[in-house]
Amino acid sequence: MAMGAFKLTIGRWFAAAVVMVPLAAAASEPVAIVPNEVIYPGQAIDVALLREVAVTNPNVRADYVSSLEDLRDAVARRTLLPGRVIPISAVREAYAVERGAPVRLVFSNAGLTITASGSPLQSAAIGDFIKVRNTDTGVTVSGTVMADGSVQVVAQ
C-alpha cells in the first residue's frame, strides 16, 4: 500500500510538472489572436469569437494581430478562418459613413458655418478624405469624415 501511495504522489507531481512547463514557456512566446469560427468579409468582428494563442511556428507571417484591443470595432476585409492568425491587412475600421446614406456637410471659414445634406460617393471611416454629392445642388465636394458622422468640407 505504501508503494501505491508513492506512485500516486509521483504521478500527481509529474502531471503538475507537465502542465506547468507549457504555461511557463507560453509566457515567453509571442501571442496571436485567432477566430473560433469563420468570419466573413464585411462582418463586424465580435471579440467573443476570438481567442489568444501562443505562436509556436517560427514560419508564421510577421504582420498578424496580437492584441484583442486592435480588433475592437473592426470589420473583416476578407474571410478569416478558425485557428489561423489574422493578418493586419485583413481587418479595417468600421465605416462611419456608408455610400449613399445621408450625411451632414459642414463648411466653416472665418466664423461662418454652412451646413447642407449630402450623399457620400464611397464608404469611409473617421478621418478619411472622401467625395460627397450635395443633395440640394448636385455639386460634388470633398471633405473629411468626422467622429459624429458629418463631413467637414474643404474650400475648393
Image (spheres, grey):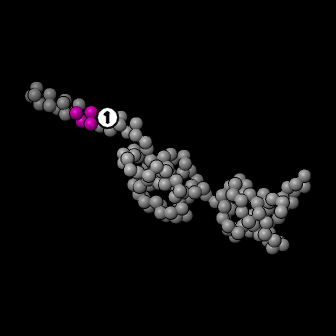
**From the viewer's perspective, is 140 left or right of 43?**
right
The answer to whether residue 16 is magenta is yes
Q: Position of residue 27 (x, y in %)?
A: 40, 36
The overriding secondary structure of the stretch rendered in magenta is helix
Q: Position of residue 17 (x, y in %)?
A: 27, 33
Along the line of sight, the residue nearer the viewer: 115 or 153: 153
Q: Secondary structure at mark 1?
A: helix
Question: Which amino acid type is shown beneath numbered disc 1?
Answer: Met
Q: Residue at x 40, y 40 (%)?
A: 29
The answer to which quarter of the image holds residue 9 is top left
Q: Residue at x 70, y 69 (%)?
A: 121
**From the viewer's perspective, is 99 left or right of 104?**
left
The residue beneath circle 1 is: 20
Report if residue 149 is visible in the image: no
Q: Is residue 140 above or below residue 33?
A: below
Q: Residue at x 53, y 56 (%)?
A: 89
Q: Position of residue 82 (x, y in %)?
A: 41, 57
The answer to whether residue 80 is magenta is no
Q: Position of residue 70 (x, y in %)?
A: 55, 48
Report if residue 42 is visible in the image: yes
Along the line of sight, the residue nearer the viewer: 123 or 4: 123
Q: Is residue 123 above or below residue 147?
A: below
Quarter of the image containing the C terminus?
Answer: bottom right
Residue at the limit of the structure toward the right, as seen here: 111
Find the magenta span and give its range. 14-18
Q: Residue at x 54, y 51 (%)?
A: 71
Along the line of sight, the residue nearer the viewer: 117 or 124: 124
